Image (cartoon, rainbow, N blue to C red):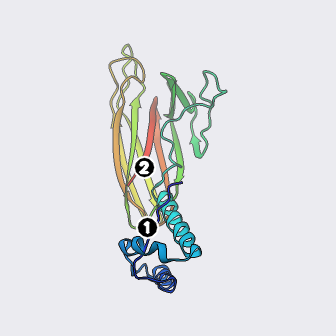
Amino acid sequence: MRQIRFRIVGITDAHVQDWQKRTQNSNEKAVSQRQIAHAWPNLSLATQVLLTLTAAATLIGVASRTSQGHVQNDFRPPANAGDSCGSDVPGWIHAGSSADGNLNRRNGSCFLMLGGGFYEAGSASWSTTLYRLIRGKAYHLRFRISNESNPKSPKPPLSITVKVTSGPLTSIHSYTVNASHGDPWSAWQTEVQTFRAAQSTAVLEFSVTNQQYDIGLDSVSVSE
């Protein structure tokens, strides 16, 4: 783990303890990092260790607030899955139609599918919970979608609804993707949706309603 060491000039252990108390209570930066840097040799070993641990904890806190590890960027199959993508994705919940399967595979990578399949209309959704959000901050949701297509049997435009709910705030938009003119699942378009967190968590849901054929979903990520 990376460590940050502070030193202080003209400041005693008592000053540092007072600074820590005020910083914890009100985030007051009473002592600058430059002051800390110069007084380091005059501090006791216990105080040096305490400051080092405090700095390390701060770095961990920042990493936790910015990490979006709960969002699956690429729906790769388990190592022992062979050529199958399976039907479940850890951390995600599927509901509704599974006519042609919940996942599909292309170029060694798996992606989610939503729709009623080739022969009938259906409704389906994939959802997950986002964690470590900062209240009041805006986030950018990115994802790719594709229209199931076949040059010999063109499919109509397909639509997907994306909803992010954080406390009382809801961001909801619909996106349309046209059929490609190449092989099935050969054309993908990237979409970006912005939402604001009202609390530390949010529920992300992708859904289709009464739709024939399938829409593909891949490369889901969230960033500040």
153 vs 137: above or below = above
Residue 33, quarter of the rendered image = bottom left
Residue 119 visible in the snapshot: no
Which quarter of the figure is the C terminus placed in?
Answer: bottom left
With 193 as the anchor, is 201 left or right in this view? Answer: right
Q: Residue furthest top?
A: 152
Task: Indicate the position of residue 223 as horizontal and vertical percent values.
Answer: 40, 51
Could you classify mark 1 by the number of other residues whose Cα lies within 10 Å: few (under 14), some (14-19), or many (20 or more)? some
Return the residue at label 1: 135
Q: Nearer the viewer, residue 27 or 51?
A: 51
Q: Which amino acid type is shown beneath numbered disc 1?
A: Arg
Q: Is residue 191 above or below residue 13?
A: above
Give, as a three-letter code, the residue at label 2: Val
Disc 2 element? strand
Q: Percent from the top left, x then y, of residue 212?
A: 46, 31
- What residue is drawn where x is 59% and y is 46%? 91
Residue 55 appears anywhere in the view: yes
Q: Looking at the rendered structure, which numbered label has been put on residue 222?
A: 2
Which callout, 1 or 2, points at the residue further toward the start of the chain?
Answer: 1
Q: Across the whole image, how many numbered discs are drawn on residues?
A: 2
x and y percentages locating residue 162 in the rendered image: 42, 48
Q: Secondary structure at mark 1?
A: loop
Question: Residue 177 versus residue 143: which sits nearer the camera?
Answer: 143
Asked if residue 158 is positioned above or below residue 127 in the image, the reply reads: above
Neighbour class for label 2 at 10 Å: few (<14), some, many (≥20)? many
Pick whichever, 37 or 147, lies toward us: 37
| Residue 185 x, y percent position in the rendering | 42, 24
Instruction: Please state if 171 lies on the left or on the right of 112 as rendered.
Output: left
From the viewer's perspective, tell me whether residue 191 is left or right of residue 204: left
Write the residue at 52% across / 57% down. 131
